[in-house]
Image (cartoon, rainbow, N blue to C red):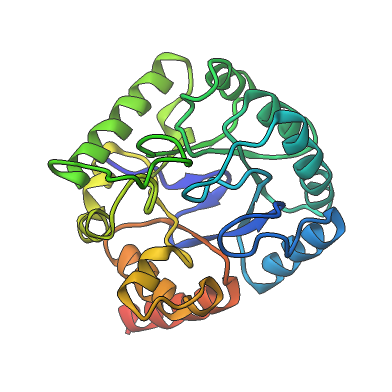
């Protein structure tokens, strides 16, 4: 099945970069760094200047072991940031699993919905996306953030993730969300061991068979530390770039990253070598 040539108004003739803005006090990588709206907006604009094609704004940490945030707190965190970035012409993705947050963010200028639960956590989420006619990123997560890393098991992780995402695409189509508005994220680190993550990365190309762009979020993930000296999140840039380039070689279309300038440079070199 052919992969769409664009997503969220971005052509997919080259890998695209989704910059991360966590408006949270407890995200695994940069919790608290951009918790104030002004700082988050400034950071989002800096990511665009560094080369981000779109910016993903989230107000609830979904790191392993995290507790959920109530909707009012999430709204208070993200809405000023989404509004501020959208007014500057930034293509904003709202990273949320709540329909109320999705709806409010879309009302102030968000252009994409990114849901770690693939529109399953909130019964109204599917309808919000369908009615708004916006693109959506469906991610695979087994379990809840609080407990998802407690002994996750798969018989064949890449295939089971593939089949789940294919089922979610079918459900979206049945609800009126066309396939060309859907991107898929296999959910590295969300209910998966290091071995599961490596298997998924090695077989990432199978997700292209579903016919939607593939989003890869490997940036600063804990698997990098588990493979190299338990380094802290902000020291995982090299590992993030290695995994990102492997992902692109295996068919990823959009890289969700914290370190935009470094990713842009790595992609520039990678593409130049491919085109030489």
Among the 4 quarters of the image, the one containing residue 267: bottom left
From the image, which quarter does the C terminus lie in?
bottom left
The percent coordinates of residue 54 (x first, y second) are 62, 55
Q: In percent of the image, x 31 and y 78: which residue is there?
A: 274
Q: In percent of the image, x 38 and y 19: which residue is there?
A: 171
Q: In percent of the image, x 69 and y 24: which residue is there?
A: 100
Disc tally is: 0
Residue 13 higher or lower than 98, as above or below:
below
In this orientation, which residue lies closer to the viewer: 183 or 69?
69
The percent coordinates of residue 204 (x first, y second) are 26, 54
Q: Would residue 229 appear left or right of 160 to someone viewing this image? A: right
From the image, which quarter does the N terminus lie in?
top left
The percent coordinates of residue 30 (x first, y second) are 64, 64
In this orientation, which residue lies closer to the viewer: 186 or 36?
36
The percent coordinates of residue 73 (x first, y second) are 76, 36
Q: In percent of the image, x 29 and y 31: which residue is there?
A: 164
Residue 124 higher or lower than 222, as above or below:
above
In this orientation, which residue lies closer to the viewer: 30 or 164?
30
Q: Which residue of the protein is positioned furthest toward the left in this rendering?
A: 155
Residue 156 higher or lower than 188, as above or below:
above
């Amino acid at each position: 099945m052919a992969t769409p040539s664009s997503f969220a108004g971005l052509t997919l003739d080259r890998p695209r970069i989704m910059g991360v803005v966590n408006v949270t006090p407890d995200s695994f990588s940069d919790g608290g760094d951009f918790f104030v709206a002004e700082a988050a907006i400034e950071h989002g604009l800096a990511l665009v200047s560094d080369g981000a094609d779109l910016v993903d704004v989230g107000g609830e940490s979904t790191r392993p072991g995290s507790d959920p945030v109530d909707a009012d707190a999430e709204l208070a965190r993200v809405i000023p940031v989404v509004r501020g970035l959208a007014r500057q012409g930034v293509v904003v993705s709202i990273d949320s699993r709540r329909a109320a947050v999705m709806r409010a963010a879309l009302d102030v200028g968000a252009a994409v919905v990114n849901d770690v639960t693939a529109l399953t956590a909130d019964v109204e989420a599917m309808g919000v996306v369908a009615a708004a006619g916006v693109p959506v990123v469906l991610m695979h997560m087994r379990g809840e953030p609080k407990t998802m890393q407690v002994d996750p098991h798969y018989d064949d992780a890449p295939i089971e993730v593939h089949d789940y995402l294919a089922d979610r695409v079918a459900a979206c189509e049945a609800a009126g969300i066309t396939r060309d508005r859907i991107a898929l994220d296999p959910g590295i680190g969300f209910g998966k061991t290091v071995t599961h993550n490596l298997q998924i990365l090695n077989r990432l190309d199978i997700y292209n068979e579903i016919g939607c762009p593939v989003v890869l979020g490997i940036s600063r993930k804990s698997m990098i530390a588990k493979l190299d000296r338990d380094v802290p999140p902000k020291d995982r840039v090299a590992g993030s770039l290695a995994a990102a380039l492997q992902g692109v070689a295996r068919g990823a279309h959009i890289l969700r990253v914290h370190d935009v300038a470094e990713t842009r440079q790595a992609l520039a070199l990678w593409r130049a070598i491919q085109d030489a």
